[in-house]
Amino acid sequence: MRARTAAIAVAFAVASGSALWALTRPAPAFPHAKHASLFPLCIGCHEGIPSGDRTAFYPDSGVCVRCHDGAARKAVAWSRPAREPSNLRFSHPDHDARAAAKGDTLTCASCHAQPGPAAKMAVGRATPDACVACHMPRTRQHLALESTCTTCHVPIARAAGVPVDTIAAFPKPETHAAADFVLRHRTTPGEALARCAICHARESCARCHLNADKVPAIAALASDRRLGQLALGRAGEYPLPPSHADREWPLRHGAAARKRIEACANCHAQAGCRSCHIGEGAARAIAALPVARPGGPSGVVLGGGAAHADGARRDGAARMAAAGVATSQARRVARVHPAGFAVRHGTAAATDQPACSGCHQTDFCVKCHDGPTKPGFHPTNYVSRHATDSYAARSECSSCHNTQAFCQTCHKGAGLAAQGRAGTGGSFHNGQPLWLLQHGQAARQGLEQCASCHAQSTCLRCHSQAGWGVDPHGPGFSAERMGDRNQVTCKRCHVGGPPGPASSAPPR
C-alpha cells in the first residue's frame, strides 16, 4: 500500500466538464488501508466524482473530527488537497459515459488500484501509462512518438493557469533526446504541430528562429507570455548542419543562399553574414535575412559562440577551422582562398568580379594595386629579375604600375632610359645591336610593349613626312588589303583612314 496524497482524492483530482486542472502538489497523506473497514466504498468520501461536483470531490475536514476528537482518538490535521492547474483534458462523468457506451464497466480500482498484489484500499494516482494502455494499446509508453498527445491534453496556451515552473518541469518526449533533434524537428501545420502545441507556444520557437514571424508552422502556434519568460535569457541552439561541415562550404554556400534564403534565415541574421560579406556582391541576399531584435535571438555570428543540441558551446572560429577555413578573430573575416591565391587571383577577379565584391571593397584592391605604395608585393630582389616578366606579361604589370611614370623613373635613375631622340642615344635596347634598324618586327608583334615607354610622337619623329619619312610598313605591304581586313589598326596612325592602293607613304 502506498499511503500518499489522499489516495483516491489525488487520483480523482481532475477537472469536471471543460475545466482543466489536476493535483500536482503533494497533499497530506491519508492512510486508506487503515480506514478500509470504515469506508468500504470510495463514493463514501468522494461522492462528487461521478457527477462532477467539485465541491464534493473530497470530504470536509470536519468528518475526521467525529472520530479523532482528541479524547477517544488522537486529533489529526487534514485538509482538502490544494489544486494546481494543468493542461489535462479529463472529466470523470464523460469518461464513464464513453466507457458505458462501449459496453465497458469501470470502477475506481480500474485506474487507481496499485499494480501487483495489494491489500484492499491500496490506492494511487492514475498514471499516464495506465491511460495509454487503454486508449492507445499500440503505444509503447506515454511519451513515445506514436502517442497521440491531444487525446488527453489541450495546448498549453489554453491552460492559462499553469505556472511557469510547472511548464518548465514538463517531461520531454523521447524524440527530443536525439542528438540531431534540433536539426530535424521542422514540422508543418497539422497533427504533428498539434503535438508540439501541448508544451510549446510561438515564443518557444522564437527563442532560436530569427524569422519566426515568417514561418507558417510557427505562426500557427498560439502566443503565450509564460513561454516567453522561459525563453528569456536562454541562447538559441544552432547545431552545425551536415552541409556546413564540408570543407568547401564557405566557398560554395552562396548558391544555397540564393536558392533558398529563407532556410538560412532560421539561424542567420544580416549582421552575421556581414561579418564576412563586407562588399556589395551579396547585398540582395543578405537584405532578405532578418535583423536581430533587441532581447531576441542574435543568430549565428562568425567568431561568436554557437550553442549545440548537446549543450556544448563551440566558438564560431573553431567551427570554421574545423572546416578548413582560417579566420581572423580581430575582424571576424573568413579567409576562404587557398594559399598563394594573392599572386594568381587576376583571372578569377576578371571573370567573376561580383563574387569578389561579396567580400572585398574597392579600397581593398587598391592597397596592393597601387604601384609605389606597396613595393613589398613582389618577392625579394624582384627588381633585378623583373625584365622577363614585364616583357611577357606587361598587362599584368600595368594593373599596379603606371608604366610611363613608374618604369621610366627607375630606368632613368639606372641609366637605362633613352636620352634625346628615343632609340638613338639611350641604352635601354642596348642588349641587341642595331636595335633601331630591327625594332619594326617587335613593334608590329607587340606594340603595347613599346607603348609602355614610348608615345606616338616618338614614332612620328621618324615615321612621318614631317620627320625622316621612314616607311613603317614592311616589304610587300598592301595598304588596301589591310584596310579591308581591319581599318581600326590603320587608324592608330592614319587619322583619315588608310591611303589608297597606290600609296604606301608613311603616315602624316
Image (cartoon, helix red, strand yellow):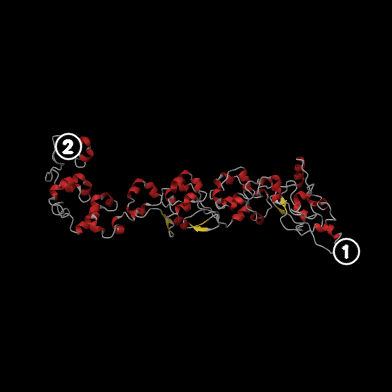
Q: Which residue is mark 1?
A: 72
The residue under label 2 is which amino acid type? Ala
Q: Quadrant of the C terminus?
A: top left
Q: Residue at x 40, y 53 (%)?
A: 336
Q: Which residue is mark 2?
A: 479
Residue 371 in sight? yes
Looking at the image, the residue that sits furthest to the right is: 72
Q: Residue at x 47, y 51 (%)?
A: 244
Instruction: For marks 2 and 1, give the one nearer the viewer.
Output: 1
Position of 435 with respect to 360 (left or right) is: left
The residue under label 1 is which amino acid type? Ala
The secondary element bearing badge 1 is classed as: loop
Q: Residue at x 17, y 45 (%)?
A: 441
Position of 262 with respect to 59 (left or right) is: left
Q: Quadrant of residue 378?
A: bottom left
Residue 197: give x, y in percent of width and height.
63, 47
Residue 267: give x, y in percent of width and height.
51, 51
Residue 440: give x, y in percent of width and height.
16, 45
Q: Quadrant of the N terminus?
A: bottom right
